Image (spheres, rainbow, N blue to C red):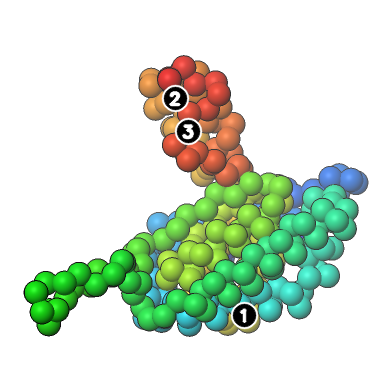
Amino acid sequence: MVKLESYLAGRWQAGSGEGEKLTDPVTGEVIATTSAEGLDRKQALEFARTKSNPTLQQMTYKQRAELVGKIADVLSAKRAEYFDISRKNQGTTEGDASFDVDGAIYTLKQYAKWGQQLEGKLLKDGAQLPLSKTGAFVAQHFQKPLEGVAVFINAFNFPAWGLWEKAAPALIAGVPVFVKPATATAWLTQQMVKDVVDANILPAGAIPDHSTLGHWVQAEAARAGAVLAALDPACAERVKTLAVDEIFFGGGRPWSGSSRPA
């Protein structure tokens, strides 16, 4: 049986206690456990902000895109292993596993290809603006990468694709990511992150994988529900359900059960 650890602040860490059980959906056998008890999330986020973010942003867009391409190569070499984990932890067919795993690899390669077309550490924002009649003086606006950490709470049904479709553009933009996969199917996400870490491709902490955040998400869901209940009672229960091991698909659109007008 596998005990899943989280990669936080540049090192692998295991939570204390028995933790949550991951099972084979076909046989019911417990195949892995994971715990969030005693893990310092604040330290992990601070590490990503102060260590990983500056290191990534010292590179050009093209250099970061090359790293994303190397991630795709590492995952491609382990494809058969990921299919096996997907079958054991999700009960998937080969076609289902391919949709998730191969989709993740293809997405990484595509973003790496797009990133190769970007030059420098800044992106030009529009054309040059003339500041004199003769054109001797001009101005140019630039966009720079955001500072901080991208935090992802991913759905149970795409533990591979759900991670890399969001991590790829964030990393190319120079932003480290903090990943909370759904606990029930976290094994595949954790193994992929472990393989990338072992390959020593990214700066330490660029992908903190917190595969053991179930209790924390549940607590935050309760808090969010209490706040939303005061604003919109029709949405309170929906938020509590979505927050636990699901990704938030918001986009500024009200849910169908909301009492507020669109």
Which kind of residue does numbered mark 3 sit on?
Arg
- From the viewer's perspective, is the residue at label 1 or at label 3 nearer? 3
Q: What element does badge 2 sit on?
A: loop
Numbered badge on residue 70: 1
Residue 90 sits above or below residue 261 on the image: below
Q: Which residue is mark 3?
A: 253
The quarter of the picture where residue 141 lies is: bottom left
Residue 58 sits above or below residue 33 on the image: below
Quarter of the figure that contains the N terminus: bottom right
Residue 53 sits above or below residue 183 on the image: below
| Residue 94 locus on image (x, y percent) | 87, 58
Residue nearest the viewer, comparing 69 with 148: 69
- From the viewer's perspective, is the residue at label 2 or at label 1 nearer? 2
- Give the mark nearer the N terminus: 1 vs 3: 1
Q: Is residue 200 visible?
A: yes
Q: Quick check: marks 3 and 2 in contact, CB under 8 Å?
A: yes
What residue is shown at x 46% (from left), y 17% (from top)?
A: 259
What residue is shown at x 61% (from left), y 43% (from top)?
A: 245
**Left or right of residue 49: residue 92:** right
Q: Which residue is mark 2?
A: 262
Q: Residues within 10 Å of mark 1 (few under 14, many from 20)?
A: some
What residue is shown at x 41% (from left), y 61% (from top)?
A: 149
Task: Report the Cα–Cα distance between label 3 and label 2.
Answer: 7 Å
Q: What element does badge 1 sit on?
A: helix
Which kind of residue does numbered mark 2 sit on?
Ala
| Residue 78 locus on image (x, y percent) | 76, 74
**Left or right of residue 170: residue 2:** right
- Give the mark nearer the N terminus: 3 vs 2: 3
Residue nearest the viewer, comparing 24 with 114: 114
